Image (spheres, rainbow, N blue to C red):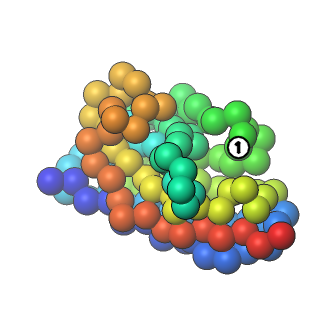
Amino acid sequence: QVQLVESGGGLVQAGGSLRLSCVVSGRTFSLYCMGWFRQAPGKEREFVADISRSGGNVHYADFVRGRFTISRDNAKNTVSLQMNSLKSEDTAVYYCAADRNCLSTIDARAYDYWGQGTQVTVSS
């Protein structure tokens, strides 16, 4: 079984930064593509960013491109999301997820394991 634990969420003013981390245990971390998703109240869960097994390929949702950076450290079983220039509309619960097959990593349904989520609140 794979376990994912996010951390780093909190309250920040608009224009500020936060760094989310997700530690993965239970299986070989480098076998999984990793993604970050978010869900705001009353909205569907949406794709934010993903990263390939080696870290060589990344994708971003249009609304975070240029502001957020996803990275991974396979030696530490960790995937991170650096979030800069935060906006009030970035307020959501952020989830990391692991995908063994890496076929459709922008689709939440493709992911096999999920963390419990970490709240990010951006005040305007």
Q: Residue at x 61, y 76 (%)?
A: 10
Residue that appears at 72% across and 56% down:
89
Q: Residue furthest front?
A: 42
Residue 55 % position (x, y):
50, 36
Task: Indicate whether 46 appears above or below 75.
Answer: above
Q: Is residue 19 visible?
A: no
The residue lying furthest to the bottom in this view is: 11
- Direction from residue 8 to residue 89 in the image, left or right: right
* Residue type, label 1: Val
Quadrant of the rendering where the C terminus is positioned? bottom right
Residue drawn 40% across and 38% down? 108
The tally of labels here is 1
Give the percent coordinates (x, y) of residue 121: 66, 70
Residue 24 locus on image (x, y percent): 32, 57
Position of 90 with respect to 3 (left or right) is: right
| Horizontal arrangement in the rendering, residue 72 relative to residue 85 (left or right) | left
Q: Which residue occupies the foreground of this view, 35 or 70?
A: 35
Question: Does residue 101 appear anywhere in the picture?
Answer: yes
Which structural element holds mark 1? loop
Percent of width and height locating residue 1: 15, 53
Q: Residue furthest top?
A: 103
Q: Quadrant of residue 25?
A: bottom left
Q: Which residue is mark 1?
A: 64
Q: Residues within 10 Å of mark 1 (few under 14, many from 20)?
A: some
Q: Nearer the viewer, residue 41 or 106?
A: 41
> Which residue lies at the image location 40% right of the left edge and 25% below the top edge?
104
- Which residue appears farthest toward the left when viewing the image? 1
